[in-house]
């Protein structure tokens, strides 16, 4: 039941994150015709929403909301005596994140009176956009796991939210950096959408970025966290668990 509760938190958090991304994009395009203003509104809402979701749900699941974060947490902790992410968490989290992303997009469509499922027509297959996703995802992995190796996991909500908000602007792809979110954004033909045909390229770029980020992390912070210290999201979960009602 504990694993089911953690998977539910990942489903809920990913759904909420995609609803924020898609919903704020729809709202922004309805309020302004200036693309810069639209992107500003979308990025600010996403950064703030992500930070809040990490604070709220980290005590339950570690607040990954992202398959590449879960995969990296599993890989980096695989040699620890008590890893925060085992094979069973991996098997539960990944489908929960994918399902949550789809549910969040459907919810956002419905809230704005759009068809619940509408495949996006926004092509994002250009090579420079894929390069942007490699950079965005590599940076995210470094931010998330460097904090654990520095012993500062409590900064994760602000740091991750701030990084994603900034990466909206300094990457050509507007920083999806998340395979589950990419999948969810394929079923909304709105400002935040991505054509289904562009999804495989984005996911491949994100996986490549995760590998690059892991290599950069190892070069910059060669000393793994101390025994018993989990990657950033799960360190937040463990330290905050004591505050939960029993």
Image (tube, rainbow, N blue to C red):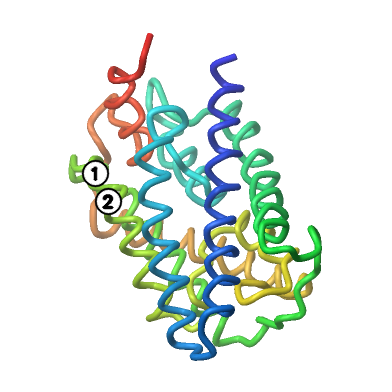
* 22 left or right of 168 in image: right
In the figure, residue 197 lies in which quadrant? bottom right
Q: Along the line of sight, which residue is nearer the eye, 126 or 79?
A: 126
Q: Verify CB contact (< 8 Å) between mark 2 and mark 1.
A: yes
Q: Is residue 58 above or below residue 165?
A: above
Residue 145: x percent and y percent? 33, 48
Q: Is residue 186 above or below residue 223?
A: below
Residue drawn at (52%, 46%) of the image: 65
Q: Is residue 94 above or below residue 44?
A: above
* 42 left or right of 111 in image: left
In the figure, residue 26 lies in which quadrant? bottom right
User: What is the secondary structure assignment of the residue under circle 2?
Assistant: helix
Q: Is residue 92 above or below residue 13?
A: above
Mark 2 — residue? 146
Farthest residue, direction bottom: 34
Residue 183: x percent and y percent? 69, 59
Residue drawn at (49%, 84%) of the image: 172
Q: 10 Å neighbourhood of mark 2: few (<14), some, or many (≥20)?
A: many
Residue drawn at (48%, 31%) of the image: 85
Q: Which mark is residue 55?
A: none
Residue 3: x percent and y percent? 57, 21
Farthest residue, direction top: 246
Q: Along the line of sight, which residue is nearer the eye, 73 or 79?
A: 73
- The quarter of the rendered structure image containing the C terminus is top left
Q: Along the line of sight, which residue is nearer the eye, 13 or 151?
A: 13
Residue 218: x percent and y percent? 31, 54
Mark 1 — residue? 149
User: What is the secondary structure assignment of the residue under circle 1?
Assistant: helix
Residue drawn at (49%, 91%) of the image: 34
Q: Along the line of sight, which residue is nearer the eye, 135 or 155?
A: 155
């Amino acid at each position: 039941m504990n694993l089911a509760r953690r998977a539910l938190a990942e489903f809920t958090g990913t759904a909420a994150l995609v609803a924020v991304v898609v919903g704020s994009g729809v709202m922004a395009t309805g309020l302004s015709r200036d693309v810069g203003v639209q992107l500003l509104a979308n990025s600010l809402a996403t950064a703030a929403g992500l930070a809040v979701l990490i604070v709220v749900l980290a005590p339950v699941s570690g607040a990954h909301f992202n398959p590449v974060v879960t995969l990296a947490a599993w890989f980096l902790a695989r040699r620890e005596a008590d890893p925060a992410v085992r094979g069973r968490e991996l098997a539960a989290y990944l489908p929960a994140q994918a399902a949550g992303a789809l549910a969040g997009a459907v919810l956002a469509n419905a809230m704005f009176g759009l068809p619940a499922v509408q495949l996006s027509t926004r092509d994002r297959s250009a090579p420079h956009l894929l390069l942007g996703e490699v950079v965005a995802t590599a940076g995210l992995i470094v931010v998330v796991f460097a904090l654990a190796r520095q012993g500062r996991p409590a900064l994760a909500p602000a740091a991750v939210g701030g990084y994603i908000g900034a990466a909206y602007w300094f990457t050509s792809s507007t920083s999806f950096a998340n395979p589950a979110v990419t999948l969810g954004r394929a079923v909304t033909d709105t400002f935040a959408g991505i054509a289904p045909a562009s999804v495989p390229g984005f996911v491949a770029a994100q996986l490549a970025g995760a590998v690059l980020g892991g290599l950069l992390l190892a070069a910059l912070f060669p000393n793994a966290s101390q025994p018993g210290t989990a990657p950033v999201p799960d360190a937040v979960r463990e330290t905050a668990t004591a505050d939960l009602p029993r």
